[in-house]
């Protein structure tokens, strides 16, 4: 059976996911087979496995860091919010139902066998399992039937590292308060604390480190500096949304929808030398970008209504008339069409008018499309003909089926799910597609850049972008290097009950 360590946090967004990712990488570098595990994840950024099953993106990044194929065993329960108190519940990669929060918590015990089986299967196959918690273990109202923090630690009999975020202030109070609110069994499971996102001279922090160790009786195993690694974000608290876009030749504006999903589609575009990417929520901030992007969303119809109410829809239509290229992905593609119909109440039910920029009608289905695809862009008659012949790989996650009107142009020809078919639609300067990951190779971004008026003559080289896997490997190594230099890895191995490698240096990944 695998040795196990669990990463819990004093709050959400303190760095649990990155810490788990970095440890997965270190264990791989040190010659161990490691796998991530998070029993229950709540996020709108998801991923499709080779088997066509859906899981949280954080565990995908952790699996990549560990050098193993992502599996739904690593995230048996995924909750995708569809409203303020409603989630789509996904178990072992398959949709179970849309549930109000109260119903999910009432039925949570039903899903425990799936969690235990997934963990047990991983534990029999790997040397080390790195478990990630969710939120804080000190949420005393959620203690009963907990399956993601101390409840999961008990199932796996896992020692715990508690992570606190010093960047927000109050890190010592949050560590002490968290431990004070835990039950005795939970407190004894915490074998070390970790202070994350530190900026400054660690020597100034030393008196506080000594005092928190005395107060809790638990050693501080590391102080991790703020590190700017480019690793896929898990959810909508991403710091990317506050970025104003770098000073690059071309301005790419992404609509920050209320229920934005899979915005990782644009991470690769941010790295392109030609595009500065920014997220906008109002017509005032939108201005006149060189490229407009409408991302995916968990609730297409309510988010379209939101754009209609705050004036963004009118601003987008104005930009279309001014020949600004527009690309909609998944839910963004559906919004650009003529009509949206929800006969089964998949979202909010009923019908509504789309933005009428693409000759497409969408009907929401009860079953979800989940598949990996590869494709090539078709010859097109409008602006986006600049992309004709571009090859790409990606994946689809959507509930709707979009039907092109007679004479409409399909964006691309796809292979995926055991069939060949057409995807998306294009008309003039407007393009829509169901494929996530369109920009990952860099080729499509470069073609767009060179076709835009301000991009004429740009020699944007996509050679450094084409191997996205190599880029991500470098980011995982950077994260691992940072943790190695700031964490007592000998202590971590002692907590694991594993003999530490002779040298705590980075080995080739």
Image (tube, helix red, strand yellow):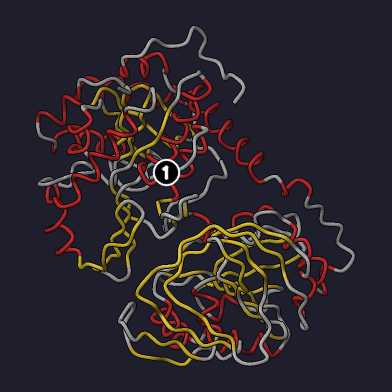
Q: Residue at x 56, y 80 (%)?
A: 284
Q: Nearer the viewer, residue 474 or 396?
A: 396
Q: Nearer the viewer, residue 200 or 300?
A: 300
Q: Residue at x 52, y 71 (%)?
A: 330
Q: How many marks?
A: 1
Q: Quadrant of the C terminus?
A: top right
Give residue 55's position: percent from left, percent from top: 40, 52
Q: Nearer the viewer, residue 155 or 283?
A: 155
Q: Nearer the viewer, residue 70 or 135?
A: 70
Left or right: residue 228 compared with residue 59: right
Q: Identify the residue position indicated by label 1 in the image.
A: 71
Give residue 288's position: percent from left, percent from top: 67, 79
Q: Residue at x 38, y 81 (%)?
A: 302
Q: Few, some or many C-alpha atoms within 10 Å of disc 1 (few <14, some 14-19, many ≥20)?
A: many
- Figure quadrant of residue 505: top right
Give residue 62's position: percent from left, percent from top: 46, 38
Q: Quadrant of the N terminus?
A: top left
Q: Residue at x 32, y 65 (%)?
A: 81
Q: Residue furthest top?
A: 502
Q: Compared with residue 237, is residue 318 higher up or lower down, i.e. above or below?
A: below
Q: Residue furthest right?
A: 457
């Amino acid at each position: 059976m695998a040795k196990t360590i669990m990463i819990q946090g004093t709050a959400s967004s303190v760095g649990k996911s990155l810490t788990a990712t970095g440890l997965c990488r270190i264990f791989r570098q040190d010659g161990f087979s490691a796998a991530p595990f998070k029993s229950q994840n709540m996020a709108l950024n998801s991923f499709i496995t080779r088997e066509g099953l859906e899981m949280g993106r954080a565990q995908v990044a952790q699996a990549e860091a560990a050098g193993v194929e992502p599996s739904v065993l690593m995230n048996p329960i995924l909750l995708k919010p569809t409203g303020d108190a409603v989630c789509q519940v996904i178990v072992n990669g398959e949709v179970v139902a849309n549930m109000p929060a109260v119903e999910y918590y009432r039925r949570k015990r039903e899903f425990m066998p799936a969690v235990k089986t997934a963990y047990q299967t991983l534990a029999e196959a790997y040397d080390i399992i790195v478990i990630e918690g969710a939120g804080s273990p000190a949420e005393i109202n959620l203690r009963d039937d907990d399956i993601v923090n101390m409840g999961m630690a008990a199932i796996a009999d896992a020692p715990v590292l508690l992570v606190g975020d010093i960047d927000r202030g109050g890190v010592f109070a949050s560590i002490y308060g968290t431990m004070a609110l835990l039950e005795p069994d939970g407190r004894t499971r915490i074998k070390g604390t970790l202070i994350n996102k530190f900026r400054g001279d660690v020597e100034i922090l030393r008196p506080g480190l000594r005092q928190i160790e005395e107060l809790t009786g638990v050693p501080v195993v590391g102080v991790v500096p703020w590190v700017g690694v480019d690793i896929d974000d898990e959810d909508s608290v991403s710091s990317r949304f506050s970025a104003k876009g770098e000073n690059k030749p071309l301005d790419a504006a992404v609509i920050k929808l209320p229920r934005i999903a899979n915005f990782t589609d644009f991470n690769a575009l941010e790295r392109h030398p030609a595009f500065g990417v920014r997220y906008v929520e109002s017509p005032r901030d939108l201005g006149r970008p060189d490229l407009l992007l409408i991302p995916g969303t968990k609730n297409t119809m309510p988010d379209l209504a939101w754009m209609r109410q705050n004036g963004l829809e009118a601003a987008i239509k104005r930009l279309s008339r001014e020949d600004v290229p527009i690309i909609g992905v998944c839910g963004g593609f559906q919004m650009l069409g003529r009509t949206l119909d929800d006969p089964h109440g998949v979202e909010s039910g009923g019908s509504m008018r789309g933005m009428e920029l693409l000759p497409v009608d969408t009907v929401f289905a009860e079953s979800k499309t989940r598949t990996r695809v590869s494709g090539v862009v078709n010859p097109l008659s409008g602006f986006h003909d600049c992309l004709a012949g571009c090859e790409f790989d990606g994946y689809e996650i959507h509930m709707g089926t979009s039907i092109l009107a007679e004479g409409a142009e399909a964006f691309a020809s796809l292979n995926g799910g055991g069939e060949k078919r057409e995807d998306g639609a294009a008309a003039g300067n407007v393009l829509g597609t169901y494929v996530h990951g369109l920009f990952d190779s860099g080729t499509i971004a470069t073609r767009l850049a060179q076709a835009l008026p301000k991009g004429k003559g740009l020699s944007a080289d996509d050679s450094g972008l084409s191997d996205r896997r190599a880029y991500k490997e470098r980011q995982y190594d950077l994260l691992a290097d940072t943790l190695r230099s700031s964490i007592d890895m000998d202590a971590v191995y002692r907590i694991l009950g594993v003999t530490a490698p002779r040298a705590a240096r980075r080995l080739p990944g």
